[in-house]
Image: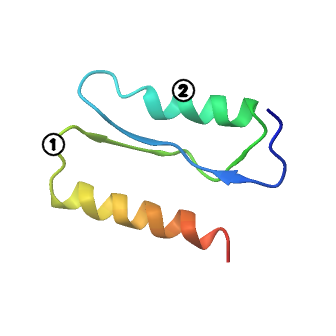
Amino acid sequence: LQFKNKKAAAFGAYGWSGESAKIIAIRLQEAGFAVTDDGLKELWNPDQPSLDRCLEFGRHLAAQWK
């Protein structure tokens, strides 16, 4: 797959190492996506500050298309 002019970001929840978002971001770049930032990772059971970061992450990603 060779995606051109497509933006992407990786995010995930973790209970152990938290490496999934980083691995997904690498794969997205390899596929040709323009990865917009370092991604987001939060613990399995998010607290309110974690949920707020997720919301802001989504807003930031959506703003990339404006």
* 34 relative to 10 in the view: left or right: right
42, above or below 49, in the image: above
Within 10 Å of disc 2 (Cα), the crowding (few <14, some 14-19, many 20+) is few
Q: Which one is in front, 32 or 42?
A: 32
Dot 1 crowding, Cα within 10 Å, few <14, some 14–19, many 20+? few
Q: Is residue 12 above or below residue 19?
A: below
| First along the sequence among labels 2 and 1 | 2
Indicate the colouring scheme.
rainbow
Residue 12 vs residue 36: left or right?
A: left
* Residue visible at 73% across and 44% down in the picture: 33
Amino acid on which the number 2 mark rests in the picture? Ile
In the picture shown, does residue 60 fall above or below 33? below
Image position of 40 (left or right of 9):
left
Q: Quadrant of the N terminus?
A: top right
Q: Are marks 2 and 1 in contact (CB under 8 Å)?
A: no
Residue designated by label 2? 23
Left or right: where does residue 65 sit relative to residue 60? Answer: right
Residue at the spot x=54%, y=26% of the render?
23
* Residue 38: percent from left, percent from top: 55, 45
Question: Quadrant of the rendered structure where residue 24 is?
Answer: top right
> Measured from the top left, where is residue 37 in percent x and y?
59, 50
Q: Amino acid at mark 1?
A: Asn
Mark 1 element type: loop
Where residue 42 appears, as percent x and y from the top left, is: 30, 43
* Point 28% across, 64% down: residue: 52
Question: Looking at the image, which residue is at 67% across and 78% down?
Answer: 66
Q: Which residue is mark 1?
A: 45
CA–CA distance in space, label 2 to label 1: 21 Å
